[in-house]
Amino acid sequence: MAAWYCRVCGLDYDESPWGPNGNAPDHSICECCGAEFGYQDHTPDSARQYRAAWLAGGAQWFYPKLKPEGWLLADQLGQVPDLYL
């Protein structure tokens, strides 16, 4: 199973919340940055704007209890798909 990475923060997921064809978002929420798939990451510009605001706010986890021990922001941001950087 291929990993899918949040377009905003780079968190890895087992399945794409954008569906198998990449065009049908399920509007779920990223557990790390809180982006709604299909809204804040709808375009590269919207993903960049949301990421900038999330980072400016301290890059807090949306669901803090799910934050992995030893989490490294820089490593995760390195997984953001190139188109959305």
Image (cartoon, helix red, strand yellow):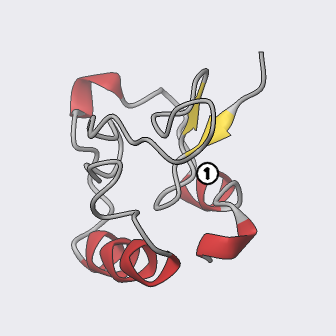
- The image position of residue 59, as x and y in percent, is 33, 62
Q: How many marks?
A: 1
Q: Position of residue 55 (x, y in %)?
A: 35, 73
Which amino acid, by three-letter code, is at mark 1?
A: Gln
Q: Name the quadrant of the C terminus.
A: bottom right
Going 40% across and 65% down the picture, which residue do you hit? 42
Indicate the position of residue 62 as horizontal and vertical percent values: 22, 43
18 left or right, relative to 62: right
Mark 1 element type: helix
Q: Is residue 21 above or below residue 33?
A: above
Q: Residues within 10 Å of mark 1 (few under 14, many from 20)?
A: some
Residue 52's place in the image compared with 27, above or below, is below
Q: Relative to 14, say whether 48 is above or below.
A: below
Q: Which quarter of the rendered picture does the N terminus lie within? A: top right
Where is residue 30, by image quadrant? Answer: top left
Who's the residue at 37% across and 78% down the image?
46
Query: On the picture, is 75 further left or further right than 7?
Result: right
Q: Nearer the viewer, residue 18 or 51?
A: 18
Q: Which residue is farthest right?
A: 2
Q: In which image quadrant can residue 29 be found?
A: top left
Q: Name the residue furthest top.
A: 1
Where 71 falls versus 65 (above or below)?
below
Q: Kindly identify the residue that appears in the image at 48 percent across and 57 percent down.
A: 9
- Residue sitting at x 36%, y 43%: 32
Give the percent coordinates (x, y) of residue 61.
28, 45
| Residue that badge 1 annotates | 76
